[in-house]
Structure formats: structure tokens, C-alpha cells
Image: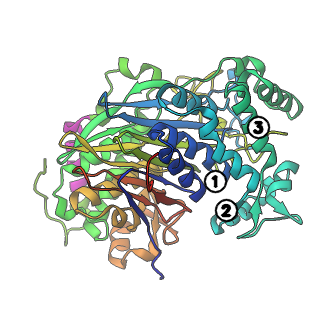
Amino acid sequence: MRKKKVYIANSLYGMVSTASKPATEAGVEMLEKGGNAVDAAVAAALCLGVTEPQASGIGGQSMALIYLKESDRVFALDGSSRAPFNVQPMKTPATPIKLGLKSTTVPSTPATLGYMQETYGRLSFSEVAMPAIKAAKEGFKVSPLIHRLLKKEAEHLREDPLIVKNFFENGEPKKTGQIIRQPELAKCLETMVKRGWQDFYVGTIGQKIVKDMKKRDGLITEADLCQIPLPVERDVLSSSYRDYDIYTFPPPGAGRVLIQILNTLETFSPDILNTEEPLGAVLSALAFQFALTNRQNMPIHPDYYLQTVNNLMLDKEYAAEVANLISNIAKTNLPDMYSAPPTAGETTHLSVSDKEGNAVGITQSIELVFGSKRMANGLGFFYNNYMSAFDYKNMTHPYYLLPGGKPWSSVAPTLLFKNGSPRYLLGSPGSSRISTSLAQVITRLVDRGEALETAIAAPRFHSSDTGKLLIEKQRFTDDVLDALTKTGFELTKRGAYSFYLGCVQGIQFPEKDGEPFYGVADLRRDGTAKGPETIT
């Protein structure tokens, strides 16, 4: 098996790490112009919607974790999309809606990015949108990953003539190395620059969306768009892991899962948590399964989270009980290698920091790959299919499909502080696999002292609440695979550096003045990391 190259960068003036080279360059351009981390993150996010269209775009939703150095403030920006008001709860279908315009919630990315930039950025919306407009006009090269995904989803994508026009050639998905240009999307972004991002909801763009919805049996109306889905600033979840402080995303995100995993693993000695050895793999896989099961069984609505007393998933004493349960399972299934341990104390992500030490992590998505598999007529962006991310069975569920409801989300952008200062900014796409991917990187950084690039490139797996386990099989030894099977997991093979096992974009902050920022882009997708060479 050929070892893949990790994308690493360093700079004294900040850092940008994204899943697409043009988006990384867009962020760096803003930093070099004197913009701050928010300006760079918004520019990169808009550009990702152009050059990584299978994963995100202005037709989706965006969630952000923001650290402002001067005020020493960390907060979450909940940019949830919303179910259309035309939803009829008494006529909810038996299965989630995944295709077509009926699967689309009210896009919130324009409102979230617009709010971020206007409230906390230095530059104008026009400046931060220009790289995305340029990329849409001039085009970008099809990567092997994008070609593979186009080919996989070709049957559904062919049903939309605009997608065929821009993403196919002679009836077939464009091949690796060919250029994809999106003139309709460029014009849409130019309209947002000229008239303001609000035009997406209450202007000419909004009118075109409503017309498109009426024509193609969608649910979004003027009433939905007039109630612009502005993001909500929320308190982050905070915890600790060994000697690091952890700040991550609250509900509707999945920071609770990450914290429970880390609290559970913290109970074990660091020297037995190597996932490339049988015992470490089993302990981690069980910790993942317990945390994801608890999230399924204890859903919490974001608007009522602060009023609830249900903070069990954040409780370290509860995590110790879970760890004891895991110990007993390991003793039963791995008697020859286990002795009781000593107690020890289809989405994208971008990470940005500026010279001053401000930091922004954005996880944004159109939900499944290419979202609803439909493009906005004359506007060039993919509609999301977040209607598939609601509960369809239990009307008392916090995320049951209701008019104006917010969907489940698995995002968990995360900041690690040490001695009161930021040390790492991490985030990943991957639905329920986000928290498990981040946990594996964090334990390698903290417990094994690995470099950021080593921790991100390391072999990875994911165990779900159902007991199914996805694993980069050829990167693990037979002993590890046997131990996981004996413990009761049902193994599903994924390729080395699998697209489906997260894509962590990471930044390491300097510990001392004069030291550089380091950025790493996960090689599981098409990402790059880069920092400014100078600042204007």
C-alpha cells in the first residue's frame, strides 16, 4: 500500500486549512489584505461552495466556532437551516425525503456567512466574495474524488439539465482534469455582492427560488424566505482532557458526543489507548459506541438546552461508570491482553487563524453528497436535502419534522487550549463520524505526543450506536481486526484514507512569540493548508 502525502504548511502570519486549494487560497488572500480570521473564513467558505460543490454551498447550512482573542471569548454560531412552513405534521411520510426540491430546507449559509462577516469581519462582503466569483467564472479542475462522486451519483444528477450542462460532457460526468465552470452561480454571487447577501431571501434571488419551488413541487415559499434564518450565538460546551481545556459545539451539534468520548478515554492510562493495538482499538470503539448511543437516546433541542438538567453526557463521573462497563467488556472478550488499567485523571470543514490569534472553524454542508441532487434554476447552486435529517416517527422528539423546525446536526468544530492559550483548532465533516474522527486525532496529539500531521494521517475507524464498525482495514493488523470482531463489532471495510472516515482540517497555534502557525489538511479529500507570506 502506497503511503499518501500529507499537506503541511507554516506561516508567522496565520493559517488556513480547507478541503479545496482555491478555497485555501481565498482565505490566505484575505489575510494578506489585512482581513482577520472571520474575513478569511467567510471567503474560504464561499469558495468551498464553488470548488467542492458536492459537500457545501449557499444552498446549505453553516455552523461556526469562533474565538476572539481581544475579548478572550469562544462562542458557537448556530446557523441551522429551517423546515419550510408548508410541512404538514399529520401527513409526515414514513421515510425521510432525500431527493428533489421537497427535500430542501430554507438555506442558511448566506445568512450565517453574511452575519459573521458584517458583525466580526474587517473587510466588505464584496471583497470576501470575489475569490468565489472568480472560481465560478474561470472554473476549477475536476479532482479524482469529485469525478468518482459525480460518477456514483450520475443517475440522479442527470435528471437536472443545469447539472448536466455544467458537470457533464457528452452525457457523461466530467473526467479528472477537466474544467467545471458555473456561470449561473457566478451571476448569483455577483447579485449578492451588488444588492447585499439579503437579496438571497428578500430580493431577486429569493423571487427566483420561490418561482423554482412552485414550478418543481418544492415546499419553500416567500413566507419562509422573508423570515431570514439569521444564526444564533450560543455558549460553547467546555470540558477538559488531561491537561487541555476543550471547547466544542453545543446542540444541535454533536459536541456532547466528543466530550463523552474524551471523558471516557481519560479514565484509562494513555499508554493503552493506541488504536493500532488490539486493546486501544477495542476501548476506543466501545467509547464511541456508548457516546453515540447516548446521543440517540437523549436528544436535546438547542433552544431549550440551557434549561435542561440533562447534562449526563458531559459528566466525568458518568464517564467513569461507562469506562468501568467498557473495562468489563474488554476483560470478557480479551482476557489474554487485558488487565484493569490505572485510573487517569457529506459536509466540509475549514479552520482559520490570523496573526492576532483569532480563530474560526466552520463546518458547512448541503447534507448528503450533492444534497438534493437538484440545482437552483438560473442560480447555479445545489439545493440541500436537510429534510432527511429530521426524526419522522416520534412527535415528541426534539428534531421531529415540524414547520420551521431545525434539523439534527453532527458538527463539532473544536478548540483545544493549554495554559489559557489556544493550541489546536480542529474540525471535520462526516456526519456521525465527525466526533469519532476528532477524538482519534485528539488522543494521538495529547496521549501520544504525535505531530499534528501524523495524528491526522493515522489509520482511522468509526463504530456506530448499532455496533457496525467502518475501518480502513488494510491499515490495521489482523490482531486489531480480530479483537474488534471478538468484542462483537460488525466490521465494514473501507479503503485506506477513506473519504467516509472524516476529513480533519487542523491548525496548531504557536506557543511563543516568533514561532509559526502550522496547518494540516487531511489527505482523505482534496485539501490544502497555507498561510500568508506577508500582511498588507
The disc placed on residue 146 is: 2
Q: Is residue 410 above or below residue 447?
A: above
Between 343 and 133, which is closer to the camera in this rendering?
A: 133
The residue segment tinted magenta is 315-328
Rounded to the nearest whole Å, what is the CA distance between mark 1 and mark 3?
A: 17 Å
Between 98 and 416, which is closer to the camera in this rendering?
A: 416
Q: Which residue is mark 3?
A: 188
Nearest to the eye among marks 1 and 3: give it.
Answer: 3
Residue at (33, 42) in percent of width and height:
357
> Where residue 400 sits: x, y (%)?
58, 27
Contact between labelled residues 2 and 1, with CB atoms less than 8 Å apart = yes
**Mark 3 residue crowding within 10 angstroms, few (<14) / some (14–19) / many (20+):** many
> Where residue 533 sits: x, y (%)?
44, 56
Residue 476 within the segment the image draws in magenta:
no
Residue at (58, 32) in percent of width and height:
124
Residue at (55, 37) in percent of width and height:
62
Between 428 and 368, which is closer to the camera in this rendering?
A: 428
Which mark sits nearer the N-terminus, 2 or 3?
A: 2
Rounded to the nearest whole Å, what is the CA distance between mark 2 and mark 3?
A: 23 Å
Q: Which residue is mark 1?
A: 52
Q: Which kind of residue does numbered mark 3 sit on?
A: Cys
Name the outermost residue toward the front.
536
